[in-house]
Amino acid sequence: MKKILVVDYGSQYTRLIARRLRELGVYSEVVHHSDDVETEDLMGVILSGGPRSVTSKGAPSLPTWLREVDVPILGICYGMQLLVKEFGGLVEKTETAEYGRTEVIVKKPASIFEGISERLNVWMSHGDSVVKVPEGFEVIAVTENDIPAALSSLDGMIWTLQFHPEVKHTEMGMEIINNFLFNICHADRNWTIEDFLERKVEEIREEVGDGKAILGLSGGVDSSVAAVLVHKAIGDRLINIFVDHGLLRLHEEKEVPMVFKDKLGLNLDVVRAKDRFLKRLQGVTDPEEKRKIIGEEFIRVFEEEAEKLGGRFLVQGTIYSDVIESAASGKETAKIKSHHNVGGLPERMNLKIIEPLRYLFKDEVRRLGELLGIPGEILYRHPFPGPGLGIRIIGEVTEDKLRILKEADAIFIELLKESGWYEKVWQAFAVLLDLKTVGVVGDERAYEYVIALRAVNSVEGMTADWSKLPYELLDEAARRICNRVKGAGRVVYDITSKPPATIEWE
Ligand SMILES: Nc1ncnc2c1ncn2[C@@H]1O[C@H](COP(=O)(O)OP(=O)(O)OP(=O)(O)O)[C@@H](O)[C@H]1O
Ligand SMILES: O=c1[nH]c(=O)c2[nH+]cn([C@@H]3O[C@H](COP(=O)(O)O)[C@@H](O)[C@H]3O)c2[nH]1
Ligand SMILES: NC(=O)CC[C@H](N)C(=O)O
Ligand SMILES: [Mg+2]
């Protein structure tokens, strides 16, 4: 099949590039920069960003096969910096780093910017910058800080962007990728989600054979879609298991089983495992350690259940943001956090893992869910991390802190629903800080915990901006929480984008 090759330098966003290409109906393959690759049927090449600096010793370089191909090349961030270095320009760590929203000004008409406004807000994530442009290249856009934001070679074969067109927060990013694909590479449209579904169902049937599989069901979007998909492949030989680890939101241990049976009509076993999770978390404060413990305990529960049922496979609703942040995608990728279902998995385990959604992003999973006929009520829930409140209580998890956080979170979510804001934000929740502050209540001194509220807009969770909730709503949330939740004495609102922050606090 004709393809675009996406060369991975360890960016958080590499698979997002591939995903944008899918969205535009174009088939692509992601390869590591040191891989030997088939260069047949190539329509173009995209070099990803990466955490390394091209100025440092031993930094990954251009693949040798790249010199022999005669198709257009697009370098993004690290990819741009590599191309600049290769052609005799200069990249240095400059005083100004650019992270998050940055304004870019297009300086020259160019086919990659066709139909793009002259000024646009893009998402940046770099500390190094181009300080000398290589011969045979011209600057076609600069940032508000006068740093080169895009270059092109005079023969129109090499294009570079310092910003990330693949992230949703970059305005007109899709149009820029569209221009690269169709104006520059003249790519074919050859990928659909229907084909993907058919292929996955076949693959799972083949892998499981006449065996049994268990599936970790959380009631969230990803595991529900995975459940319906795998059920389509192997029917009732799939057994869904919901683990109540005590770190769920208020009343969720009752609601999830009800909604799941009611709306999807699939079987579901509930495992009550609160005590064993809380016991293992006692005295643990490090976020990575907490994640690893929770990840391991999940697997132990699944192993025990599989043993009882005679199943050999474990299906998880892992999606790509879980994989990439756990640094499970390649050796250059920086570890941001160990998602319980990926980086938090124990080394030794008896189950074979099946993850049909591993390379998809949240909104693709939602589209797949629609294709499978899953109701919007399940598909459009806010995401909730598997380790649950365990990573929203900063520091040690205790019963009392769990109570405070559950109540505060429920008040915030209820208020968002009442005011019509729940559907307008991508994810919202409360965090309990490991910090007490002084207050005055009924003329008495109080010394209670701080609750942080977080609400973000995002599309696939890879980048996010804080939601501009109305002051009146925040005001009401603070009053209700302080008045109704014993132990909560102060409320703050988180106004950081991702990057530099992540969505969750741990
Ligand atoms: N309480 C739970 N019981 C069983 N499995 C779980 C539980 N929590 C998480 N998992 C497993 O871990 C996977 C990853 O969790 P994650 O929260 O990312 O996905 P999700 O809950 O399916 O969807 P969402 O992101 O919308 O919450 C799930 O798909 C599921 O397989
Ligand atoms: O299943 C999960 N297991 C985890 O360990 C985990 N950590 C974060 N998240 C969710 O992933 C999205 C991105 O979150 P971050 O910006 O905090 O990394 C957000 O939607 C987070 O809620 C997790 N989901
Ligand atoms: N996102 C990237 O590709 C970053 C490239 C390089 N590490 C820098 O900071 O400039
Ligand atoms: Mg979840």
Image: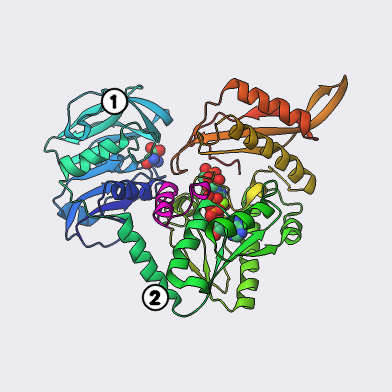
Residue name at image x 72 percent, y 31 percent: 481
From the image, which quarter does the N terminus lie in? bottom left
The disc labelled 1 sits on which kind of residue? Val
Badge 1 element: strand
Read off the magenta span: 358-379
User: Upstream in the sequence, badge 1 or badge 2?
Assistant: 1
Residue type beneath disc 2:
Glu
Residue 67 spot, x, y in % from top left: 18, 52
- Of the four image quadrants, the one with ligand 3 is top left
Q: Which residue shows up at 58% across the image and 79% down it?
A: 310
Q: Which residue is mark 1?
A: 142
Picture quarter with the C terminus: top right
Residue 420 is labelled as none
Q: Is residue 419 left or right of residue 117?
A: right
CA gap, disc 1 and disc 2? 52 Å
**Rendering quarter of residue 203:** bottom left
Question: Is 311 situated above or below 137?
Answer: below
